Image (cartoon, rainbow, N blue to C red):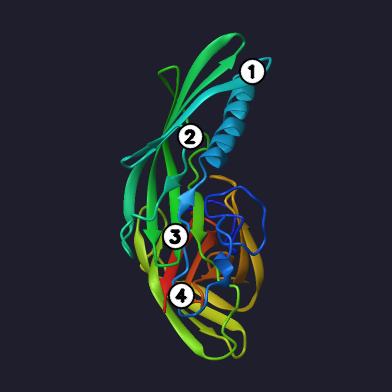
């Protein structure tokens, strides 16, 4: 978890695919029809084509900054995450250890043609990843950019942490009961603790994050249908139920995951420090 923009909602055209099918947790037919006694298939894949499309957009913006005229053609794209490498396949994050904040090196290598010449661009970063049984949140923080082997200065927008959320979103919320969720929060540098309570009788929730400088009070807000787009990463969309409210540090959003809302994942849009990611289970 880290900082950035896009806000959590919940469920998917997505985990790892690019079809826009509201209310669908993956591209596996019937994923949302799992009974309470069955273990649903949770798709923790990251769309290669999605992150390639995002990189293509960023490279064209870089060309504009460099005042390069004419068309920019993306000739090849390769991405490395930890010990995984791909030039065409989706990434599978299901092997990330449960409930452990993991850091992995991230690297994109692009060859693009502009003005008749090939240019090699590399983007390095660190991904902080936290996986639960039904959900996952990652914050990818850029650390360096090179153009044809020469280092480029990262702009303010370039070093924002990009949030990625995946998982099996809750389609039928509990209609009664109060549940306490506990877990972690992270701003990309430090790790804190999450405590959040949801009263499904009243349809409201509130909580607190501690351990990240001053406490963050997640004020009470109502459950509603929500959506989230992994805009800065693989472009996939999540649809489901969540909560959107205010805090003393900025607005927050979270989504419910698991067949019976066993988990939550969300972000705080910290006014001063970018986005803070959090996740918890009951």
Tell me what residue is drawn at x 60 percent, y 64 percent.
Answer: 9
How dense is the environment of label 4, judged by Cα within 10 Å: few (below 14), some, or many (20 and up)? few
Residue 117: x and y in percent read 55, 9
Q: CA distance from mark 4 to mark 2?
A: 32 Å
On the rendered image, what quadrant is the N terminus found in?
bottom left
Label 2 near label 1: C-beta < 8 Å?
A: no
- Give the residue number, with chain letter if any, for mark 1: 67
Of labels 3 and 1, earlier in sequence is: 1
- Give the residue number, with chain letter if any, for mark 3: 136
Q: CA distance from mark 1 to mark 4?
A: 56 Å
Tell me what residue is drawn at x 48 percent, y 57 percent.
Answer: 43
Of labels 4 and 2, earlier in sequence is: 4
Of labels 1 and 2, earlier in sequence is: 1
Farthest-out residue, top: 116
Figure quadrant of residue 123: top left
Figure quadrant of residue 107: top left
Tell me what residue is drawn at x 47 percent, y 51 percent.
Answer: 45
How dense is the environment of label 3, judged by Cα within 10 Å: few (below 14), some, or many (20 and up)? many
Q: Is residue 194 visible?
A: no
- Give the residue number, with chain letter if any, for mark 4: 38
Q: Secondary structure at mark 3?
A: strand
Residue nearest the observer in this picture, 219 or 181: 181
Q: CA distance from mark 3 to mark 1?
A: 39 Å
On the rendered image, what quadrant is the C terminus found in?
bottom left
């Amino acid at each position: 978890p880290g900082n950035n923009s896009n806000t959590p909602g919940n469920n998917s055209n997505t985990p790892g695919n690019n079809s826009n099918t509201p209310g669908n947790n993956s591209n596996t037919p019937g994923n949302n029809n799992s009974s309470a006694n069955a273990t649903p298939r949770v798709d923790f894949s990251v769309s290669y084509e999605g992150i390639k499309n995002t990189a293509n957009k960023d490279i064209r913006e870089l060309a504009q900054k460099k005042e390069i005229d004419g068309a920019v053609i993306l000739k090849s794209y390769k991405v490395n995450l930890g010990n995984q490498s791909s030039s065409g396949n989706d990434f599978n994050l299901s092997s990330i250890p449960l409930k452990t904040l993991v850091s992995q090196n991230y690297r994109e290598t692009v060859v693009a043609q502009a003005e008749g010449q090939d240019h090699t661009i590399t983007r390095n970063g660190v991904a902080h990843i936290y996986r639960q049984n039904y959900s996952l949140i990652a914050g990818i923080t850029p650390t360096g950019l090179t153009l044809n082997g020469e280092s480029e200065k990262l702009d303010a927008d370039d070093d924002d942490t990009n949030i990625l959320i995946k998982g099996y979103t809750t389609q039928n919320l509990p209609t009664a009961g109060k549940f306490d969720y506990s877990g972690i929060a992270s701003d990309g540098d430090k790790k804190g603790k999450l405590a959040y309570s949801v009263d499904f009788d009243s349809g409201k929730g509130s909580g607190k994050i501690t351990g990240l400088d001053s406490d963050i009070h997640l004020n009470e807000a109502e459950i509603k249908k929500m959506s989230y787009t992994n805009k800065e990463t693989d472009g996939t969309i999540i649809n489901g139920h969540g909560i959107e409210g205010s805090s003393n540090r900025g607005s927050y959003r979270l989504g419910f995951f698991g067949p019976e809302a066993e988990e939550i994942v969300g972000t705080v849009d910290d006014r001063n420090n970018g986005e803070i990611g959090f996740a918890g289970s009951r």
